[in-house]
Image: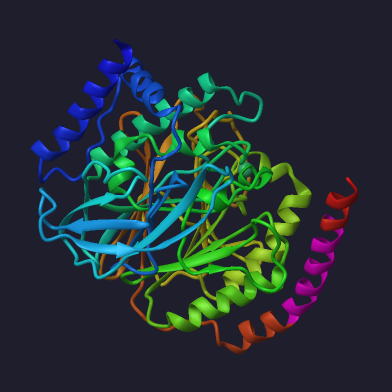
Amino acid sequence: MKKFTAVILIISLVLSANVLAFADFNAPKLTRDEWNMIYDSYYPYNTLPMLCVGADETQVSLCWHADKTNAVSCVRLSENEDMTDYKEFSGIKTDAEKNTQVVCRVTIDGLKENTIYYYQWYTGNEWSKICKYETKSFGNHKVLVVGDIQIAEDWRTDSDTQSDIGFNWNNVLAEALKENPDISYLVSPGDNTSTGKTDAEWQTLLMPEAIRSLPLALAIGNHDKKGMTYNYYTNMPNEYYGKHFRGLDRDFWFRYGDVLYLFYDSTSGDAPDHMAMTKEAVSLNQDAKWRIGVVHHGIYGAGDAIGDTETELLLTTIFAPVFESYDLDFVITGHTHSQGRSHFMKLGKVVQKAESGKTYTDPEGIIYLNSNSVCERVYMDYEADHLAYSFIENDVTTYTTLEFTDNKMIVKTRRGDNSELLDSITIERTTSERKENSIGNVIYRLAYKVVEFVGLIYVKIDELIKYFG
Ligand SMILES: [Fe+2]
């Protein structure tokens, strides 16, 4: 009876998307009982797909697990709700972590802006249910930032805990998308999973129906690094494996409209590869108006990282020079499970105050936004000179939106339960001029060679410790 009710509930949720043909997302806020039924119905399987951002705004990709025997890596895309006149896209199949399944990855390209699409993927036995994906404007657009989704927790990795966090994840998404139906994609600074070892963590992350219509860009966090499952459940664009990265290590980048995103694996001290990825991505995207960094660990963040000298030293030594010498505008971080935002930072100092509600034109320095967590939150009441704003309550998560208009980037952080506005700031750029080739920055990067050398030694020592540990 329970299963039957769950199936009816899921069908009604899917149908509601079709009835509300021009509603942007099928993202209902659920009661705990409604969520439990969805969780129980999906939990035994491992086949939910992830919609991932593409290399640019005309692409998205799909990544899913399917039965090894009959899997075909194929997606159908149509502008018609009944899937007539569909176009088929083929991709690749690779080994899954379990011998009974394979991982299918398909890139869809040629997308047009402001268009409603419908798609299906081949599940291994049949074509899936029909899902809707609506592209928004490729120019001015809005992005959702949610951090440390971290399905399961440090100390509780059981199914009930996963369900607790999945429930919170579903409802913060529902709240954010109800308030911001014009969201184009989601950026997260990592710790998507807690152990990085189970399929159930990823399946729980993928259970909210909104995920079928919301491309994800997920950084790697230290918790993801505890296992290897990130390898099997994501399909991020332009992955950069460098010369010295090992295992899960990787950076990646993508471009959407006027915005270049640079995602870094902050669990790796491999400074030469972080710098090389940045150089390559920036040189290929000289015309991008905005440069946004995404890194898991919180540089100039809020919360525990403030007291962790080793982490802070590593981050400010390895990453801050990369961000500064390539003239990034804004950096998104996470890890500490607490919401905070810095002033404009440069060379470890506040170069300009960045007060809530104000607009800053062609500012010097970089703002660092530390996002909250979806899983358990940390009570924080830290004072630090670099912090312009911090949210000290721990009974509710928060979310942030970045809105890119012609010359402005508007950043707003809201409560995750009722969207009350907590913090906002606007950066305006009146010039396309970039400073990465200034004499100062060229010298900065020459001096950074020392950091690259020391960073590699650090990586090698870390490898030896893991080998003998
Ligand atoms: Fe973390």
Q: In the rendered view, would you say 360 is above or below 46?
A: below
The answer, for residue 387, to whether it is visible in the render is no
Q: How many marks?
A: 0
Give x and y (percent) for residue 110. Answer: 24, 70
Of the four image quadrants, the one with ligand 1 is top right
Is residue 457 located in the magenta-colored stretch of the structure? yes
Predominant secondary structure, magenta span: helix
Identify which residue, 203 or 308, lies in the foreground: 203
Where is 404 relative to 38, above or below?
Answer: below
| Quadrant of the image containing the C terminus | top right
The boundaries of the magenta stretch are 447-462
Q: Position of residue 406 (x, y in %)?
A: 25, 70
Residue 284 in picture, x, y percent from top left: 45, 82
Q: Nearer the viewer, residue 248 or 113?
A: 248
Viewer-proximal residue, 267 or 421? Answer: 267
Q: Is residue 205 magenta?
A: no
Q: Residue at x 62, y 54 (%)?
A: 299
**Residue that sits furthest to the front in the current view:** 69
> Which color scheme did the rendering employ for the protein?
rainbow
